[in-house]
Image (cartoon, grey):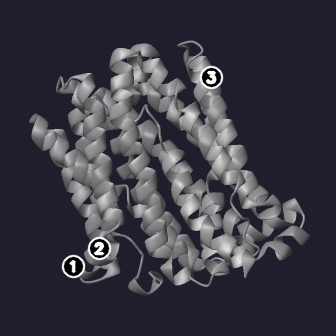
Amino acid sequence: MALEVNLKDNIWKMYAFSFISSLHFTGGVLIPFFTEWGKISFFQVMILQAFFLVFVFLLETPTGAVADKYGRKVSVGLGILSTMVGAIIYVIYPSFYLFLFAEFMWAIGSALISGADESLVYDTLRGIKKENKSKKVFGRIGSCKLAGYMVAAPIGSLIAAYLGIQYAMLLIAVPLFFAFLIILNVEEPKVGRKKAEKRSYFETLKQGWKYFGNHKILKILAFDGAVTSALAFFIIWVYQYKLQALNVPLAYFGFIHLLLVAGQIFVLNSFSFFEKVAGSKKRYLLLSAIIPGLLFILLGLTLNVYLSIFSIIIISALGLTRKTLFSNYMHKFIPSDKRAVVISTIAMISSFTMVVNDLVMGFLVKWNLKYGLILLGLFIIVFSLVSRVKEEHLRD
């Protein structure tokens, strides 16, 4: 009974962790941080992002095995510490090569957290026999993360305007430290843990990879979620570039980012409503890809500031929340003792698609912002129309 009470406490602790660890003050000024303070080009920013994602890709499954073998909270805690180091390295000196090292530390942190945090939450729900609430809980956790970004973005814009953009990056280390303290006080769920602990690290890795490779539905969900999420996620990098092209003052970037995140929070807490309005889960997934695709095309064509901001907000609200929805559906097909390594394997696919997308789209946008955005929108629409996801794959 005491263990069940502690596990129930995990949920609100993970809400708090998600909020505090997402207080990234660079959210609204990230491109200016790189191009103005860091003195690198937009395409070099995309190279940095690709470098980060390559290492996340290489580390996802090994770190997932760490989480399954040694514990999810251990993996998440180490990930937070590594991310803190990355944030500090970033502000030592504006150098592309130093930025590469910072991205490497950030990649280690991201890989250690990815899969482990979701597994911690889902196995907590299984431990208290409330896994049927996973869509709601994952939605709330996603909302807490976004609320952190939303609160931090305007603060970061003010920090950048009055202290300097580099301080917006440096001060990320403060909330990360408090997030680390929270994760130390989370109870490790015992669901599936004994079976995982008895296996060697390499056996854990092997079985997780094999399970995913033999699961047809998981592969379909993972591929669809990875590609559409990678394409939609490019809005995070390109919207500030678009605002700069429209001569929007830097001080407003954080407040626009706030609206961008607020839209995502609304959608994350309204999945069931939107699925009912759409008529089915499958139809909602289709619309949540096609609408952002059309708006990417509009964003490429328009020179109107307000229409651009509207497009950015809706693309983010629908496109960037699909990952949370897919995570909810995929967890239904994964056993607890393989959960973190399988989710990390799926994240590898996402990382790989984002590497390719960021390099290709980064080059296209640098060559021509208008045509790059139009092509991105067309890619999303075409891929959404050939999706192999079926209604029966989407379990609550």
Q: Position of residue 212 (x, y in %)?
A: 66, 71
Label whose residue precedes the other's in the sequence (1 or 2)? 1
Reading the image, the residue beneath label 1 is 277
As helix, strand or loop, the secondary structure at mark 1 comes to: helix
Q: Quadrant of residue 194?
A: bottom right
Q: Position of residue 294 (x, y in %)?
A: 19, 55
Q: Amino acid at mark 1?
A: Val
What whole-number distance in Å separates the C-alpha atoms at marks 1 and 2?
Answer: 8 Å
Q: Position of residue 205 (x, y in %)?
A: 79, 62
Left or right: where does residue 205 sit relative to residue 272?
right
Q: Amino acid at mark 2?
A: Tyr
Q: Amino acid at mark 3?
A: Ile
1 lies above or below 362? below
109 or 284: which is nearer to us? 109
What whole-number distance in Å separates the C-alpha atoms at marks 2 and 3?
Answer: 42 Å
Residue at 9% from the left image edge and 36% from the top image edge: 304
Reading the image, the residue beneath label 2 is 284
87 or 383: which is nearer to us? 87
What whole-number distance in Å separates the C-alpha atoms at marks 1 and 3?
Answer: 47 Å
Label of residue 25 in the image: none
Task: For label 1, count other residues whose C-alpha is less than 10 Å away and answer few (under 14), some (14-19) or many (20+).
Answer: few
